[in-house]
């Protein structure tokens, strides 16, 4: 998953109130992580089997926050899949519709109507071309990096005032 990295530069010769910084930085981090959670929710807005996203908020003692899911299907969508062969397991042939529109678009924080279309066909084997990675986590981290940096700068400024 994508990570956001911050480096702190504190002004020399000024007092630094660490507890003030911890409080302000954790508040800024938590407001940013709420935006990240909303963005992840947008990526599954049209899904019928939506994954559950878990949020772990930062505290003054733990300046780390996370949004994650353990949903296997979401992982396949985010990271993509390689080309693979599909064969029937409990029937003599596969049966499926030939047309398909995905509900998500690579590197777009959105979800749209999609699904199957076209005539129904049967086949003993299908060579699936794979799925292009959506990279939602990378896009969200890139969008929120400047927001989080601004929050940390504000926390540093208040801690050195």
Image: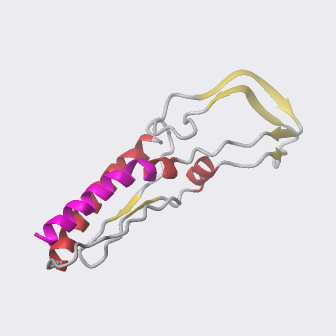
Residue 152 colored magenta? yes
Against 57, is 83 above or below? Answer: above
**Residue 139 picture location, percent across and down:** 48, 47
Which image quarter: residue 92?
top right
Q: How many labels does the image show?
A: 0
* In this picture, residue 126 sits left or right of residue 6: right
**Residue 90 picture location, percent across and down:** 81, 48
Against 57, is 51 above or below? Answer: above
Which residue is found at the position 83% from the left and 43% from the top? 91
Against 78, is 105 above or below? Answer: above
* In this picture, residue 47 sits left or right of residue 116: left
Which residue is found at the position 25% from the left and 58% from the top? 151
* In this picture, residue 66 sits left or right of residue 93: left
Residue closer to the observer: 122 or 118: 118
Which residue is found at the position 25% from the left and 67% from the top? 26
Residue 117 colored magenta? no
* In this picture, residue 139 sits left or right of residue 106: left
Instruction: Return the residue found at the far top.
Output: 119
Residue closer to the observer: 95 or 79: 79
**Residue 130 picture location, percent across and down:** 74, 43
Magenta stretch in the rendered image: 141-161
Image quadrant for the C terminus? bottom left
Task: Characterize the magenta stretch by its predominant secondary structure.
Answer: helix
């Amino acid at each position: 998953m994508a990570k956001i990295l911050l480096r702190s530069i504190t002004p020399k010769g000024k007092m630094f109130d660490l507890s003030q910084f911890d409080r302000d930085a954790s508040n800024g981090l938590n407001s940013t992580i709420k935006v990240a959670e909303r963005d992840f929710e947008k990526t599954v807005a049209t899904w019928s089997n939506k994954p559950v996203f878990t949020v772990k908020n930062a505290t003054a003692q733990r300046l780390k926050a996370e949004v994650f899911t353990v949903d296997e299907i979401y992982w396949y969508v985010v990271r993509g899949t390689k080309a693979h062969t599909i064969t029937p397991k409990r029937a003599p042939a596969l049966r499926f519709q030939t047309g398909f529109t995905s509900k998500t678009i690579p590197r777009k924080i959105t979800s749209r109507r999609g699904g199957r279309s076209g005539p129904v066909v049967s086949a003993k084997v299908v060579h699936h071309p794979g799925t292009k990675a959506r990279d939602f986590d990378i896009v969200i981290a890139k969008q929120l990096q400047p927001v989080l940096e601004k929050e940390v700068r504000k926390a540093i400024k208040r801690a050195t005032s």
